[in-house]
Image (cartoon, rainbow, N blue to C red):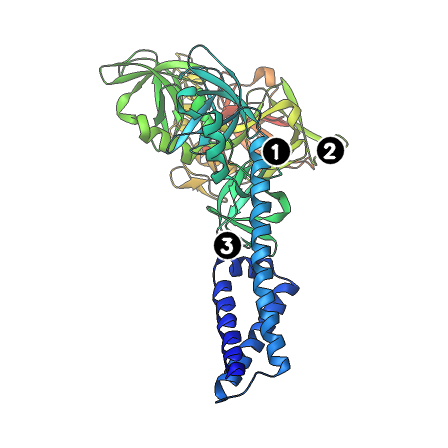
Amino acid sequence: MENNNEKKDYIIRLDKARKKRSNNDYKKLLVMGGTAVLCVAVISAVGIAVKNHLSAKPAGLATASEATAIKMEESAGLSAEAESEAQAAKEKEEKEKVVSSYKNLGIIKVSGYLNVRKAPGTEEDVIGKLQGDSACDILENTESGWCKISSGGIEGYINSEFVLTGEDAKKKAMDLVKLRAVIQTDSMNIRKEPSTSSDVVGQALSNERYEVLGQSEGWVQIPAGYLSTDYVKLEYGLNEARKLDLKAMIFNLYKNIGISDVDNYLNVREEPNENGKIIAKMPSKAAGNILETTDGWYKIQSGNITGFVKSDYILTGQAAKDEALQVAELMAIVNTDMLNARTEPSTDSKIWTQISNNERYPVLKQIDGWIQIELEENSSAYVSTDYVDVRYALPEAIKFSPLEEKANAQASFRAQVVNYALQFLGNPYVWGGTSLTKGADCSGFTMSVYAHFGIGLPHYSGSQAGMGKVVKSSDMRPGDLIYYADSKGTINHVSMYIGNGQIVHAASRRSGIKISTWNYRTPVKIRNMIGD
């Protein structure tokens, strides 16, 4: 009887140990992996077998091996508990280490985002954002209710009203420390699934921190998707400030943004009426600052142009901001008089054209100090980042006035040609196309414009360049054609001079028929096709 009681006691103790390990402690042990987990699994299996074997016997003692197995499982249960306690102590130590790394900790107490500004004041530029419960180091407090902070590689100012400080901040921070992925490169893609072929759902920027929800080979899961482990560091930490989305930075340039809501171009006039002189054109989705409103017109500043546009064709408020974020493109804006454009991203490579100051070129690729830019359709070049500003930008107004038809018959004819061509601004570029409304390529555009006036040209820029009379740049007149070459010296593009140092041309699928500076890249030939 005494032996039977001993057997039952072993079984009861075995059940208790097994139930204890079904708690979180047992789960933590499993997560740690390794020999201990394997050992527990084996012992558990043996223990179940022992229990089944013992319960099948009507009487008798457990064998020596069965008793040993039971004792081993009890020991494993105690070991798992100790391991769990050690893990908890280690996590607490890591959290305390993170919290103590801040000299003057602040925790943001907002439900959404708090703006980080360049200087104290709600009118100052926004340079970053702090999510609610993010951390910062408070560098100094100002008398105006703002504090200077450092967070996520950003130094700026935030409203001190929304910052928890002192011991309250430290206490709350202990619950906010988590395993996070810290971005170690300028920018990287956030993908929908853990694969390089998966859709890109966002961009993560340098020093940003994302809570880690899970890990798989080569990838970490974050709330927004997946990040490759090639460019992140995993560490315990608090969330910190994030740089302002590069697209959103365009709003720092416009205090009261307006976006042209037209398919092609919107006239900018000198006075707020239909008879006002046209001084410029705003391309489709171009941006400007609305300065004032007057009887159905907006006075607007766009680029270097200030004039009046019909308010019916301008988006404002949130609609303008939403459209701007859709339209903004990464552009290289030239900041030197003439910039060498090369065939390869190296100062040793051939200079095959030059581009002019203030011109904007779509960025195709960024490579360690070099930018690949689009010149026209299927034509690109490399320029040094030392001489361009690379940022998201919106189209802006282009200085332009229609040519007046003068008493001189020849000048009047040229004005007619140019003004006719300008009717098709904003229409699409189509490779091989000749339609001024549905789409044309560069030579198709000039051919079709001249055909309207009874002048025949071939549909190839290289062939056109062999026709007409040679013209020097100092003598060119509106209606003359200007030709450009590729890196091998082969003519590959044509435009029409419209006066005032400008051209109209079918540039690319991205921009369609547009106005540019005549030397936006170096011309190689100029031809008079009119014959006067």
Residue found farthest to the bottom: 58
Element type where label 3 sits in the image: loop
Q: Is residue 6 left or right of residue 338?
A: left
Mark closer to the observer (2, 1): 2
Q: Does residue 474 sit above or below 263 in this rendering?
A: above
Q: Is residue 198 left or right of residue 231?
A: left
**Residue 263, percent across and down?**
35, 33
**Residue 140, percent across and down?**
52, 16
Proximity of marks 1 and 3: CB atoms separated by less than 8 Å: no
Element type where label 2 sits in the image: loop
Q: Residue at x 54, y 38 (%)?
A: 209
**Residue highlighted by disc 3:** 193
Q: Could you classify mark 2 by the number of other residues whose Cα lies within 10 Å: few (under 14), some (14-19), or many (20 or more)?
A: few
Q: Does residue 383 sit above or below 413 in this rendering?
A: below
C-alpha gap between disc 1 and disc 3: 55 Å
Residue 466: mark in rendering? 1
C-alpha gap between disc 2 and disc 1: 33 Å
- Amino acid type indicated by mark 1: Gly
Q: Nearer the viewer, residue 210 or 44?
A: 44
Q: Is residue 340 visible?
A: yes
Q: Residue at x 35, y 21 (%)?
A: 267
Q: Does residue 72 sit above or below 220 in this rendering?
A: below
**Residue 252, percent across and down?**
45, 22
**Residue highlighted by disc 2:** 346
Q: Earlier in the sequence, mark 2 or mark 3?
A: 3
Q: Is residue 378 visible?
A: no
